[in-house]
Amino acid sequence: MSFTHPVLVRWSDIDSYDHVNNVRYFDYLQEARILFLAEVVGTGVGDYFTEYPCVLVSQTVDYLRPILLRHPPYDVDVWVESIGTTSYTLGSRIVDRGGEAEIVYAKAVSVIVAVDGETQAKRPLGETERAALGRHVSAS
């Protein structure tokens, strides 16, 4: 099961080539990832990161086509690909569903590590975290 968050392109996201600067893709992915994690456990954005501290340790993005400035939002889909002992991997993609066919603009893989909120040392995922994440595992 995946989560979808609509993102609007802002004028400031556009570069001199009249498309979204590649760095902004990371912003769109981050925005959706944070909202996804808050919804997964259902505690709200601030509470999730207080209760279940974690850090992004790796993110790769495949740019498939340029995103252009327009008013309808693009969708960012997020899902859990795998769950480990101290980390989990999220898949995501930026998609246009406004036409006859779905068009994928970018695909990303993000690795998140659970940490202790005080020491920032790795910690095992708790049962509540693991169960909540497990409900969102998908092969999207």
Image: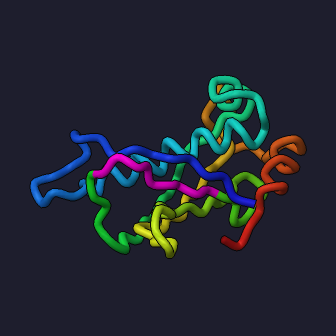
State which quarter of the image contains the N terminus.
bottom right
Number of marks in picture: 0
State the quadrant of the C terminus.
Answer: bottom right
- Magenta-highlighted residues: 70-78
Q: Is residue 12 left or right of residue 49?
A: left
In the rendered image of this protein, does residue 45 appear above or below residue 132?
Answer: above
Which residue lies at the image location 70% right of the left edge and 31% below the top edge? 48
Q: Nearer the viewer, residue 36 or 8?
A: 8
Left or right, residue 135 beside residue 25:
right
Q: Is residue 123 magenta?
A: no
Residue most extreme to the front:
100
40 or 112: nearer the eye? 40
Q: Position of residue 130 (x, y in %)?
A: 83, 50
Image position, residue 43 (x, y; %): 76, 28
Q: Quadrant of residue 55?
A: top right
Q: Nearer the viewer, residue 7 or 131?
A: 7
Across and down, in percent, residue 69 comes to 27, 52
> Which residue is depicted at the point 31% across and 61% down?
67
Question: Is residue 15 toward the left or the right of residue 41 in the image?
Answer: left
Q: Is residue 75 magenta?
A: yes
Position of residue 67 relative to residue 64, above or below, is: above
